Image (spheres, helix red, strand yellow):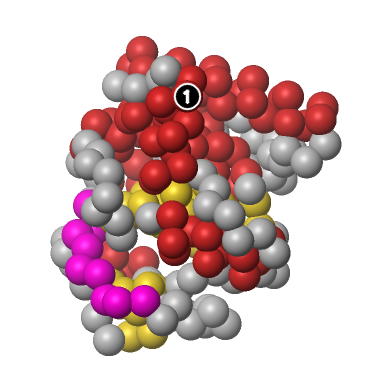
Amino acid sequence: MRMSKQVTGYRLQVTGKILSRDSNKKISLLFKTISQLEVILTCNLQPVTCNLSLSKNSFLAGFLMLPQLFWFSHQRSIKIDQKKIEALVQPALTLCLTKKRYQTSSLPTMVEISFLNDRVISKVHADFCNDASPTDVITFRHSEELGEILLGIPTIARHAKKFEHPLNHEIALCVIHGLLHLLDYDDIEEQERLLMHREQDLLLQHAIKHA
């Protein structure tokens, strides 16, 4: 699910500096120089301490003009292997650059990826889509520099069990789905949905093969 760049999501409060819903402040320099940050969701929840995982390929990603991916975990109910998920997503990210929906489509220079529980993603879903049910992925395009992918891990886990997929693969697929939304793919119309799903399946297979 993609939210347009006019709609802003749940921003993060980073080391005492609030990036509000209306903030245009850049955080790239902060992210490039600090390996661990304490962040809290600004939606009346209890503070959650998280680690910021910088990609091993940060220098290469910058050289290839790939966006930096920043990973946050705000859920503890389901055990996941974040390193394996990152390893799956990285080759798909590279190939994404060849999958622009339109000539003018581009990925933001930074993309935040957050693992959420059912309660939090249901609140986001209700606030921005008028649907209080939990969902698997919601994507925000905040600006040309910043995108955000929110993942409902319990919902993704239920889908993985239903379709008999490895959980890591299902999570990676949802990240890829979010990246395609940031490249202007949509899944509202049936024809567009089929195109998007075909591309994300191809990207996942490429990721599995090259991870």
Residue at image position (24%, 31%) is 84
Q: Residue 199's x, y, as percent?
A: 61, 24
Above or below 77: residue 15:
below
48 w.r.t. 208: above or below: below
* Residue 82 drawn in magenta: no
Q: Does residue 29 appear left or right of residue 105 in this picture?
A: left
The answer to whether residue 49 shows anywhere in this view is yes
Give SS at disc 1: helix
The answer to whether residue 5 shows anywhere in this view is no
Under mark 1, the amino acid is: Lys
Q: Which residue is mark 1?
A: 162
* Residue at the image position 27 percent from the left and 76 percent from the top: 47
Residue 210 lies left or right of residue 150; in this view the side is: left
Counting the numbered discs, the total is: 1
The magenta-colored residue range is 45-53
Predominant SS along the magenta part: loop
Residue 5 position, x and y percent, is 66, 64
Instruction: Say above or below: 74 vs 169.
Output: below
Position of residue 197 in the picture relative to residue 77 (left or right): right
Q: Quadrant of residue 74?
A: bottom left
Q: What's the residue at 55%, 65% (across, down)?
A: 124
| Percent of width and height locating residue 202 | 54, 18
Q: Residues within 10 Å of mark 1 (few under 14, many from 20)?
A: few
Is residue 48 left or right of 210 when viewed as pictured? left
Question: Residue placed at 81% from the left, 30% from the top?
Answer: 190
Q: Position of residue 39 (x, y in %)?
A: 28, 72
Q: Quadrant of the C terminus?
A: top left
Q: Quadrant location of residue 210?
A: top left
In this rendered view, identify the residue nearer to me: 149 or 135: 135
